[in-house]
Amino acid sequence: MGVPMATKKKTASRSAPKKKAAPRKKQAPGAKPRTLAIDIGGTGVKALVLDAKGKTLTERVRVETPKPATPAAVLGAIREIAKSFGDFERISCGFPGVVIGGVVHTAANLGTEAWRGFQLAKKLSAAFGNVPARALNDAGVQGFGIVQGKGTEMVLTLGTGMGCALFIDGRYVPNLELAHHPFHKRKSYEDWIGNKALKRVGKQEWNKRVRQVLAVVQPIFNPTVIYLGGGNAHKLHGRLPKNVKIGDNVAGLLGGIALWRET
Ligand code: BGC
């Protein structure tokens, strides 16, 4: 991703015959490699299995996020969910914090410091017989399941926390942590519109607040479109700005297939 192309000297002579591109194999529905797609959230851990093309092969299964949400407990919950699925050949995982190179740097809503430096991709792989595993910020994965690949597309997830992801012509800008940036007085964006705020101020006021956030964000990033995802997005009512669309929360799992395409 974003790696500059190496400049290659042209060596082919004019008369060299052009190589024909190998015909693409058609993939049957259900084709391997199948991906166990996981979405770890502050409230729920969700998972399903996707085929090689990203089509769902199983129902989405959700369990409550264990309390305390230590790495061992969360991995245990994922193992439990996966018992009801068939085989899979690789794993994609969305995680509610900064993830760089498969390693967790922050986990604001999991309530334990134990995640800092946790080798999530490696440990997931080890937990499932060393199948390859990749992990990314949850809003990033959600975005991969929603964006159209054109222009500046922004994803805000409204759940336990506030996730944020930015895509430029389909390329992901990783770990844009708007959630903990100051928004109003001493309150961060997440304090303002996260799940705790929704519970405290009620749906009506929360709806107003989400619109305030949108109004602040729009002139900074000037996105072509903002997708609202996350478990609370369906609690929005009334008109939204023209370029704001509500996405399906299952995108947080469907986007898992892109982790194998884009990195
Ligand atoms: C985290 C983000 C995450 C969001 C939604 C925030 O608290 O900092 O990384 O995407 O919650 O889970």
Image: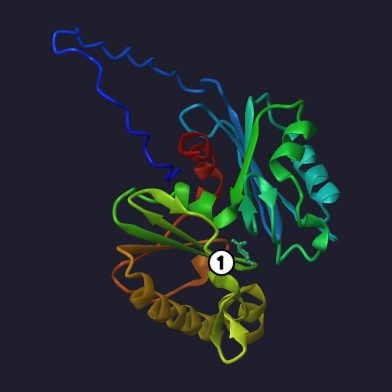
Crowd class of label 1 (few under 14; some 14 to 19; many from 20; radius 10 Å): some
User: Where does residue 67 sit, x and y in percent of width and height?
Assistant: 84, 60
Question: Which of the two residues, 1 or 248, is positioned nearer the viewer here?
Answer: 1
**Image side of residue 177 versus residue 219, left or right:** right
User: Where does residue 130 sit, x and y in percent of width and height?
Assistant: 74, 27
Q: Quadrant of the N terminus?
A: top left
Image color mode: rainbow
Label 1 beta carbon within 8 A of ligand 1: yes
Query: At 39% across and 51% down in the image, what residue appears?
Result: 147
Q: Secondary structure at mark 1?
A: loop
User: Where does residue 192 sit, x and y in percent of width and height?
Assistant: 58, 81
**Image side of residue 32 versus residue 129, left or right:** left
State which quadrant residue 107 falls in.
bottom right
Query: At 35% across and 16% down in the image, what residue appears?
Result: 24
Indicate the amino acid at tag 1: Glu
Q: Which residue is mark 1?
A: 177
User: Where does residue 76 sit, x and y in percent of width and height?
Assistant: 83, 43
The answer to whether residue 166 is seen in the rendering is yes
The answer to whether residue 61 is seen in the rendering is no
Question: Which of the two residues, 204 or 28, is positioned nearer the viewer here?
Answer: 28
The residue furthest left is: 14
